[in-house]
Amino acid sequence: MASVSVPAERPGGLLRRPHATTGFWSWFTTVDHKKIGILYGITAFGFFLIGGSEALLIRVQLARPDQTFLEPAVYNELFTMHGITMVFLVVMPLSAAFFNYLLPLMIGARDVVFPRLNAFSYWAFLFAGLFIYSSWFLGGAPNGGWFGYAPNSVTDPTRGMTFYAIGLLIAGIASTVSAINLAVTILNLRAPGMTLFRMPVFVWMGLVVQLLLAFSLPVITIGLVELLFDRLFGTHFFDVAAGGSPVLWQHLFWLFGHPEVYILVLPAMGIVSEILPVFARKPLFGYQFVVFSGIAIGFIGFGVWAHHMFAVGLGPVANTAFAVSTMIIAIPTGVKIFNWLGTLWNGDLRFATPMLFSIGFIAMFVIGGLSGVTHAVVPSDYQQTDTYYIVAHFHYVLFGGAIFGLFAGIYYWWPKVFGRMLSETGGKLNFWLMLIGFNLTFGPMHVLGLQGMPRRIQSYPASLGLSFWNMVSSIGAFVIAISVLVFLVNAIASFRKPKGMEADPWDARTLEWATSSPPPDHNFEEIPVVHSLDDLWHRKYAETEGGRVVPVAAGGSGEDAAIDEHAGEHGAHGGGGHAIHMPSPSYFPLIAAAGFPVIGYGLIFGVPAVAVGLVISLAGFFGWALEPSAE
Amino acid sequence: MASLEHAVAPPVSHHAATSTGLPSLKLAMWLFLASDCLLFGALISTYVLYRGASTTGPYPSDVFDIPYTSVSSFVLLASSLTMVLALAAIQRGDVGRSRVWLLATALLGMTFLGGQVYEFTSFVREGLTLKTNVFGTSFYVLTGFHGTHVAVGVLMLLTLFTLSFAGKITQDSAMTVELVGLYWHFVDIVWIVIFTVVYLIPTNPGPGG
Amino acid sequence: MVLGLVALALVAAACAPNATQSALEPKGPYAQKSFDLFVPVFWVAVAIFVIVEGLLVLFVFRYRHRRNQTPRIPAQVHGNTRLEIAWTILPTLILAGVAVPTIATIWDLAAKPTGDVLEVNVLGHQWWWEFDYPGQQILTANELHIPTGRPVYLTLCAVGFGYGTPVPSQGGPPAPNECQTGPPDGQPPAGIGAAVIHSFWVPELAGTQDVVPDLTNHLTIQADEPGVYTGQCKEFCGLSHAYMKFRVVAHTPEDFDRWVAEQKAPASPDVSGPAEAGKQIFLQTCIACHAVAGLETANGQPVLANGGPNLTHLMSRECFRGCTLEVNEENLRRWVADPRSIEAGSFMPDYALSADEVDQVVAFLMTLE
């Protein structure tokens, strides 16, 4: 869309409202959900490379017994930062990238309901990540584990855990407001005719995830506040000598932490639920059951948190209750897997890279899920907990699961977002290297854990017989690294190709494929009217009585205006003669977000910065509140 | 968040229907308040867990002045009434009346806050600070979070009051007042819970007392 | 491929000759209970794995689009309610089957053992393990000696500065099975390091329980055969978490009684020459933290522990320093000379002793049989 710069009168002579939607600086003021999605994706991928490098350092240290390549202080920082990075700065924002880009398109909307709030969430996330990472240079990175158990996280004398608490508080604010934004978008901005049960599964998973975020983040917010206050202000939340309880931290952390793991994996499950039908050429088997399973997982996910605390000494009643609830949550998870298998059954399977990663997801997630069920056997968990057996489990579900699913999504939607395909050869190489490397790295960890290797130790003695599988695991980690490099080369090389992708290269089923690749700023020329689940598919194909499928003749049944596939070239004009008003870019979300890390530095280094940060943020919020959403 | 003065709808037109029929800002506010429930739930749970756990004094019975706090609670409750009146007025199109009631609500809120400041300074003088014991820690953080919420509410009320002079608060934009009202009532209800759980339900001194 | 890898790994695991900390090699009834639950559940998981992954592989091969096939759009099957119900009920039944023995074993392991039970208090410090035998009036560190064939009921307590002051066994009354919290009334806070969460894990004899400040947790272990069983702290507890190891030394009942008698005797250091000088240095510096039963300070007071391990029978132990160093002259010398060169987080101060003084102290330590 052409950009026109019109100087606007502003009270008080503040910054001119930006209007550019293209160009380098437009990325700083954008409120377009698609650009914000790309920002989330690139930033998350950058953190993925950093977090992966941290993992490689860990694996170098552990490749052989009794190594002193990394001293304990540094090692403790590395595993802590690896966990924080992968959970909060990679998988969550990568999922957010997909949600941001795709949710409005999938429901037939032009943007999210609060575009500036959306931008604010991105900038707050970025600043939170930079803030946490700045700790390496400012007195030491967090070193108490990503789970930060008190009292150790309170009593540790270095500054790192203060950065941890403040950084995650900022990230939590970003995610909470984003959750509200996206949930309202899904509930309120659906195209006419798109009832809840005509929404794609990815959108359903999106809704469940936003609600999980909205209800779990406040709990850890309080936990982090209590930790921060204990460290900074001498309060006694986790001070046992004063009557405080370290178990309170664990409850607060895991009441968030367990829903968090579903926040991490449900988006990938949604992605896989979209990809399998397209590459099997038949609908998702049991759509309603898949949706209900997702909702069930969301609910039950709030009732299993103490399965992370089986060895804490809560007592047999609590342990029994949580063992049972944990087993119960395995059921909807299993239902999903069977439905995915049902989708493959009798399909016409084509193994483009998105499909390979999706099948890989299923294969790896089954393993992770099964090891998870063995954890629910509490007396056995007394042996498994805090060992590499657990490390194996969660990497199978979070890497083999979430990351594989996200990579499937990257390959699938790349042509939509960037107007070019990623190379299939590169993709296949990426997939197979990643699958092999991943299993080499994490498969042996099941064995290592059962053979006596605890977590979070920088070395192990040769006498324990752990050397062989540790070496295998470390080699596997470097294979993963190579596979990621392959992806990077593939990604960069794709930009050398000319832009010029058709709207629907995969012959897909959902609405984002009904508009150009990439979509115009306003997403659709006309908001579509939806008549069924998989509406795009049904515009292309009609089902006969016997379930046979015939393509719809070009020109369609003419019920409503056909969706214009070449919208990008025209100017913006909607049906009925109205001009489409898109929300205008704005500086204020960035400014409002920028105050938070300043407040954070102030809490650590000196009060004046707190005041400065507050002023910046308040100026941002007031400016935002007083400017109209579109000019 | 979109500007206060426009009813929020998808950017296509001002009056596009939403899929649920509920205005988006209102739905967002309800979601936010639900989320905030968990925030206070965690804080109140902390307080309840640490009831009777302090190893040294002062203890709640040493410092609480229930009659005093009852009065300030009543002040906050009254502010919810004035808030309702402010909304009713603007929904009728009576900007002037609404302005008065908005100011009244803000002033009552500020009175409540002032009362808390006085109450806390007297507690400090009696030896109860954030660092004294777990009672001080959990009490001040819980009431401090609530007080911050009240302060933010007062800020929003005064902003509305000021904007009303610029003609920005009208019958058409009554939803803005309704949103602030929702928030304000929530803060009030949370206080009722805090007042009951913290002040009214008696606490045994604990291992130290 | 993955199945093969897993099977291979497990075979390798079960056959690993060197693994001395393996949960798959239970050496006592309590570890056996965890193992006996794990094995059948594992095989059920393997069966499910084979079926599900097998179906996945089968479908991938059977329904792949072959190049010479005419392109087809398969029948658009939307679901099958009966199948959905079936594959919801079946896992439920399997899980119910797993749940019943699980719950039974939870309660079994939670019960206090009856019969001829040995009670020991396990005190977790940053970053070493202390063992207090209230019935035998013994205080030792790094090595937990137990008799075979008897359940050993452990009370797990976290200790740090101002919290969980070690239970005074020697010369004091037997301690109750309840962890201490603050220092005794009227006493100033004492101890070293922070009271944080640890976890006591000797996998061949039992699963873990955490050592949590503010909680009194219990764990029962029992060894069938005499031997040495290694263990370590499993819950991240700070800088030197990886150094916080211990050994359980199981004796026949007669040998155990002999060990008890040796440990109960106060130190009778046969000091002469350098050891005498070392003893003097010890009494001036080391008793700030370490205790030796039978020694007296200049004021005639018994030397009691204050945050460091009891050294009365140091030479009867095989390991020290969180059981990461063998007890021998060389290691003792390195440790006393510069603790932080061995363990970066150690709270043991560097008293800048000269080489001669170090030799003297070590000579004294070596008399503590």
Image (spheres, coloured by chain):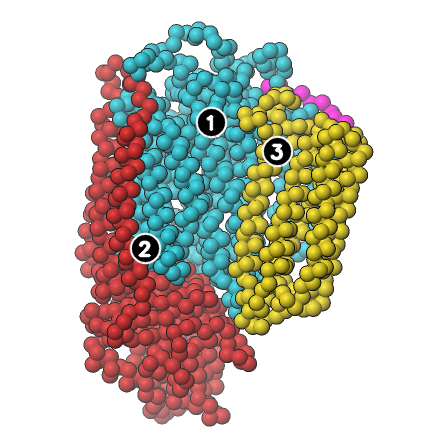
Please say if B150 is above or below C259: above
Q: Amino acid at mark 3?
A: Lys
C62 sits left or right of A270 in the view: left
Q: Which residue is depicted at the point 64% across and 51% down?
A: B191
Disc 1 with disc 3 on a shared chain? no
Q: In 3D space, how far apart are the residues under numbered discs 1 and 3 (Cα atoms)?
A: 20 Å
Q: Colour of chain A?
A: cyan
Q: Give the foreground label among 3 and 2.
A: 3
Residue annotated with mark 1: A196
Give the image location of residue A522, x and y in percent.
57, 21
Is disc 3 surrounded by few (<14), some (14 to 19) or many (20+) residues within 10 Å? some
Say whether residue A357 is magenta: no
Q: Position of residue A67 (x, y in %)?
A: 35, 59
Mark sitting on residue B26: 3
Chain B: colour as depicted: yellow
Tell me what residue is drawn at x 63 percent, y 34 percent: B1
Q: Within the image, what quadrant is residue A509 found in? A: top left
Task: State whether residue C90 appears in this view.
Answer: yes
In the image, taking residue B56 as reference, residue C16 lies left or right, namely left
On the image, the x and y values in percent for residue A433 come to 32, 37
Q: Name the residue: 38% across, 42% down.
A: A398
Please state which amino acid type lies under the numbered disc 1.
Answer: Leu
Three-letter amino acid code of the residue under disc 2:
Val
| Magenta region, residue range | A1-9
Mark 2 = which residue? Answer: A378
Name the front one of labels 2 and 1.
1
> How far apart are the alpha carbons under marks 3 and 2?
45 Å
Residues marked 2 and 1, same chain: yes
The quarter of the displayed image where residue A580 is located: top right
| Image hue for chain C | red
Q: Residue at x 28, y 85 (%)?
A: C261
Q: Is residue B115 left or right of residue C243?
A: right
